[in-house]
């Protein structure tokens, strides 16, 4: 690889990680928008997903500068946890799991319907989409780095 | 190149967040202003307890939960405003019993209203709130000894509390709170304008501005 390209052009792996960071940052700002601007109270499951999501903004950004694919090792477990929680949340939301199994006590119910964008996009679904895309990107990066 | 891309993207996203937030708040306020003109009843129902003169042009609406600490601490500020503008303000109480068990307290309040003791009971409950609400939990059994201080007919009170009409009032108020986007208490509206930002000084300023607007003509 010519030195000029390595230093100035954009490495596709870097771009991929950058896109992952972009998704994480947008999701973080989006969730803050829901709770602080639109004043939706987050339910317990939302909080757990946030725990997996928020640190990724910093972890992935750290992996971008200087570019270090080892970041995947640290980001993937968090993302996997987030994905599992999001998947569970969606099953609850779609009432595929009976509501009495949900871990939320008092406060906001995890099946509370806050918004439906375009008639189908609920907040838990947005979360699941983010985590799914993230997992796909991170696994791709992991494969490429071990190749 | 990478750093610029990163910095620019961060900046753009934060800007979108900031302007999105202010746009949302402005359009929400405009929407509520429209509601205030077209559907004033969402703010004030005939069943709502009110204080002040009927010809007052400034309606101060408070969505309150008797178990809410901030609601209690705002009570003196409302009183100050009523004293400052005694004939210009009409104060309206709406219920938003978000705390578990707070609807029972609303039932008590509505029952005392039938004995003409609503405002003093509300004041008493606010003042002694810490005795019957601990860590956001309503201890209904702690409320009764407090009521002994008032001259209420307790037999009648307990009968009145069961009246389904009170249930209807609570349900209507909760539905209106939802329609108006009240998710926290106290939720204040001055002639339909939501209190934004929240605080005692912004409330005083909003009331003053509204009084000036309605009475300068």
Image (cartoon, coloured by chain):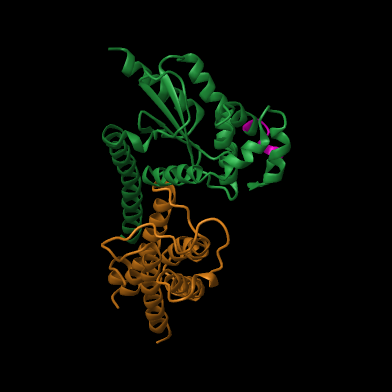
| Residue plotted at (49% across, 25% down) | B201
Q: Colour of chain A?
A: orange
Chain letter for the green colouring in the rendering: B
Specify whether residue B67 is in view.
no
**Which residues fall within the magenta stretch?**
B126-131
| Residue plotted at (61% across, 28% down) | B123
Q: Is residue A49 above or below residue A13?
A: above
From the viewer's perspective, tell me whether residue A68 is left or right of residue A117: right
Q: Is residue B112 magenta?
A: no
Specify whether residue B13 is in view.
yes
Q: Is residue A23 above or below residue A139?
A: above
User: Quadrant of the rendered structure where residue A17 is?
Assistant: bottom left
Front residue of A110/A42: it is A110
Residue A7 drawn at (x, y percent): 33, 67
From the viewer's perspective, tell me whether residue A105 is left or right of residue B57: right
| Residue plotted at (49% across, 70% down) | A99
User: Quadrant of the rendered structure where residue B193 is?
Assistant: top left
Residue A58 drawn at (x, y percent): 47, 60
| Residue plotted at (31% across, 49% down) | B16
Residue A8 drawn at (x, y percent): 29, 65
Residue B98 drawn at (x, y percent): 53, 47
Q: Is residue A15 above or below residue B39?
A: below
Work out which residue is located at the far top of the displayed protein and give it: B217
Front residue of B38/A85: it is B38
Which image quarter holds the C terminus of chain A? bottom left
Which image quarter holds the N terminus of chain A? bottom left
Q: Main secondary structure of the magenta part?
A: helix
| Number of marks in picture | 0
């Amino acid at each position: 690889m010519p030195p000029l390209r390595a230093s100035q052009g954009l490495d596709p792996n870097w771009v991929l990680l950058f896109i992952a960071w972009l998704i994480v940052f947008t999701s973080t700002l989006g969730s803050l928008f829901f709770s602080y601007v639109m004043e939706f109270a987050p339910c317990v499951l939302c909080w757990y997903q946030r725990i997996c999501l928020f640190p990724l903004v910093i972890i992935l950004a750290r992996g971008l500068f200087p570019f270090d694919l080892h970041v995947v090792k640290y980001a993937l477990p968090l993302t996997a946890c987030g994905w599992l929680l999001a998947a569970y949340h969606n099953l609850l939301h779609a009432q595929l799991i009976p509501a009495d199994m949900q871990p939320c006590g008092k406060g906001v119910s995890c099946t509370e319907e806050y918004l439906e964008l375009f008639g189908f996009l609920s907040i838990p679904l947005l979360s699941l989409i983010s985590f799914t895309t993230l997992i796909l990107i991170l696994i791709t990066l992991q494969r490429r780095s071990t190749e | 190149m990478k750093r610029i891309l990163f910095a620019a993207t961060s900046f753009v996203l934060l800007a979108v967040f900031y302007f999105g937030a202010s746009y949302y708040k402005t359009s929400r306020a405009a929407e509520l202003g429209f509601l205030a003109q077209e559907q004033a009843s969402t703010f004030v129902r005939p069943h709502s307890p009110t204080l002040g003169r009927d010809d007052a042009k400034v309606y101060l609406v408070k969505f309150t939960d008797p178990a809410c600490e901030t609601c209690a601490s705002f009570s003196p500020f409302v009183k100050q405003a009523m004293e400052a503008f005694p004939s210009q303000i009409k104060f309206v109480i709406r219920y938003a019993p978000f705390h578990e068990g707070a609807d029972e307290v609303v039932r008590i309040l509505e029952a005392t209203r039938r004995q003409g003791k609503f405002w003093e009971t509300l004041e008493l409950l606010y003042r002694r709130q810490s005795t019957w609400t601990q860590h956001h939990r309503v201890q209904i059994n702690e409320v009764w000894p407090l009521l002994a201080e008032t001259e209420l007919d307790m037999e009648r009170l307990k009968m009145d509390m069961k009246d389904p009409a009170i249930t209807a009032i609570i349900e209507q108020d909760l539905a209106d709170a939802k329609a108006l986007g009240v998710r926290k208490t106290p939720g204040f509206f001055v002639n339909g304008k939501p209190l934004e930002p929240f605080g005692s000084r912004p409330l005083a300023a909003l009331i003053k501005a509204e009084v000036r607007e309605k009475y300068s003509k």
